[in-house]
Amino acid sequence: QAGEPEVEVFSVPSYACQRRTSLENHNAPLTDALSLLAENAELNDEEGRGVAFRRAAALLKTLPSAVMSASQLRGLPCLGEHSLREILETGTSTEVESTKGSERFKALKVLTGIFGVGAKTADRWIREGIHDLHQLRASGQHYADINQPVTRAEADAIEAIVEKAVSSVLRGAQIVLTGGFRRGKPSGHDVDFLITHPEEGREEGLMPKVVSWLEKTTRNSYLESKDGPGRPPSNMDRFERCLSIFKLPGAAETPQRAWRAVRVDLVVSPISQFAFALLGWTGSKLFERELRRWAGHERGMSLSSHALYDNKQVNEGAASEEEIFAHLGLEFVPPSERNA
Ligand code: ATP
Ligand code: MN
Ligand code: MN
């Protein structure tokens, strides 16, 4: 009979790790608005609010079609008190608009867009009256490159270099591209690699060798490296992480510079922990957060990039990502569907 067209009421599992989230997003206007609010919260050190907005955005990213009315979202988790209805009806919300117009938000965006500048530094500069790049330059501050997305082609070029470095310093050592590029993203803020060797233990001491090979061999085209964030002291952690800056020959858009800086994240893992490292470093960040939340809250387990422990502290080994999902009681989600 004639009447209201049927509207689909969406139903979605609570945890992002129970869902498939490809790069195809039918609700970009909504998720852009929520991501902006998330970013603003994060830039202001409001972690809890940031996560709430990220979860809401992730939920909308997984829907199979565009949301037409708020009634389709009834009963969905994470979408509670946000101004979604307002955004749906008007295309934006007062909070989104006031954030966009906020001088502080604009300044935080510009300043954290500089290589190596985080929210804390940006906040200090703003309090010193520095809101943009002109004022920063006038203040005499040294500052590095403006962040520019890394393309897939650049990632491939860097992969070839890292591959060469790794196999030159240790025969049989292997690398895998992780992070956003493994999930199929066309660009990223850095390039992430995981390095291992099929024989347990052979990977020990590999990172310094790789780094010094890169410094020596590629002479002009490299490298500042520093150790990653503090590692746990236990000898269980034989990982090493290195955040480096590669100097790539300059892009056409920046003819005034002979090179541009690209962040490269290198992680070494023993083969026994490789599956956990691969899962942990593929992301997305929210997907990882949700995996750990699922493990803890629903399974009484503890998941890291090294291991999975059950509540009796028994170490659940795994030779593949598939096995880890199985241990967690989750359906396997391939990397291209982890773009939550
Ligand atoms: P982009 O394309 O912007 O780089 P990305 O998804 O690759 O996006 P990254 O920040 O490079 O994001 O992080 C990649 C993965 O590494 C994420 O899953 C994140 O959880 C993980 N990761 C990042 N930093 C750490 C850390 N300090 N410890 C453990 N895992 C981390
Ligand atoms: Mn990355
Ligand atoms: Mn990274």
Image (tube, rainbow, N blue to C red):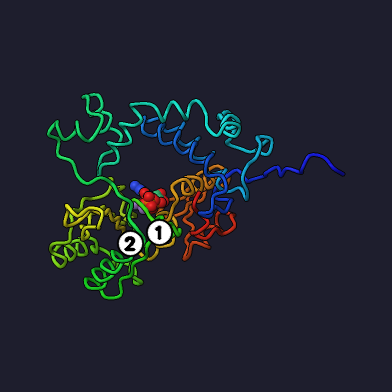
Residue in front for this viewpoint, 297 or 93: 93
Q: Is residue 30 above or below residue 99?
A: below
Mark 2 residue crowding within 10 angstroms, few (<14) / some (14–19) / many (20+)? many
Q: Is residue 266 above or below residue 96?
A: below
Neighbour class for label 1 at 10 Å: few (<14), some, many (≥20)?
many
What residue appears at the point 79 percent right and 39 percent down from the top-left corner?
4
Quarter of the image that includes the N terminus: top right
Q: Which residue is mark 1?
A: 181
- Horizontally, residue 269 falls left or right of residue 55, namely left
Q: Which mark is residue 155?
A: 2
Measured in 3D between alpha carbons, the distance from the residue under mark 1 to the one under mark 2, in whole angstroms, is: 8 Å
Residue 17, percent from left and from top:
54, 50
* Numbered disc total: 2
Quarter of the image for residue 7 reads: top right
Residue type (three-letter) at the residue carrying disc 2:
Ala
Labels 1 & 2 near each other (Cβ < 8 A): yes
Decide which of tag 1 and tag 2 comes sooner along the chain.
Answer: 2
Q: Is residue 227 left or right of residue 325?
A: left
| Disc 1 element | helix
* Residue 330 picture location, percent across and down: 58, 55
In-image side of 121 versus 314 (left or right)? left
